[in-house]
Amino acid sequence: MSMDMTTVGDTGLLDTLQHEVAVFARRAEQTRLGGVGQVRNSMDRAAYLLLNRLDKEGPMGVKALAASMGIDSSTVTRQVAPLVDTGLVKRTSHPEDGRAVVLQLSPRGQARLEEVRSSRRQLMAELTEDWEPEEREAFCSLLTRFNSALSARMAASGVPGPEAQSPS
């Protein structure tokens, strides 16, 4: 039988946790954790996550992309449109069914994604430069676990939400 952690244990710790998560969410949105240099704040979260997913999983249709990210197909269609317009994503015909559309990261999209990733890696390095390697690993592991728990909760309640399956 699980215990209700809101009444048993350290509610002060839970209050601190919920406050720090709220502050993190606000700061992450304000900065978009965009990185450093000229690349800073140059790609919104939705674009980054879509490009990252296409890079990790390869070309796929809108429905498959939406399902893998845990969001609605209409949202993916809306978010992909400017990426196609700017040449970061290509729409191609499905190799087996020419009527179906497949989304694919373009060479320009691949280069842009790597540029943003590099800038974000630099930001993470700067923010954690005085951390021990074990602290970075622990933080990453716990944040991944936290995001997975949020995703599972949202999926169980039928609420589509941002994916947390792959690192950003």
Image (cartoon, grey):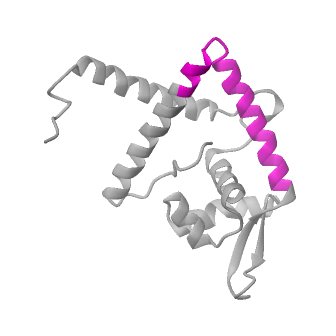
In the rendered image, residue 44, in percent from the top left (x then y), is placed at: 66, 44
Residue span colored magenta? 108-137
Task: Please identify the quarter of the rendering in which residue 40 is found.
Answer: top right
Q: Is residue 66 left or right of residue 126?
A: left
Which residue is at 70% across, 88% downward?
A: 97
Image quarter for residue 124? top right
- Which quadrant of the figure contains the C terminus? top right
Relative image position of residue 62 (x, y in whole percent): 61, 71
Residue 125 in the magenta stretch? The answer is yes
- Left or right? Give the position of 168 relative to 1: right
User: Who's the residue at 56% across and 32% down the image?
Assistant: 28
**Front residue (pair 16, 82):** 16
Quarter of the N terminus within the rendering:
top left
Q: Main secondary structure of the magenta part?
A: helix
- Asked if one can make out residue 14 in the rendered structure from this viewpoint, the answer is yes
- In the image, 90 versus 125, the foreground residue is 125
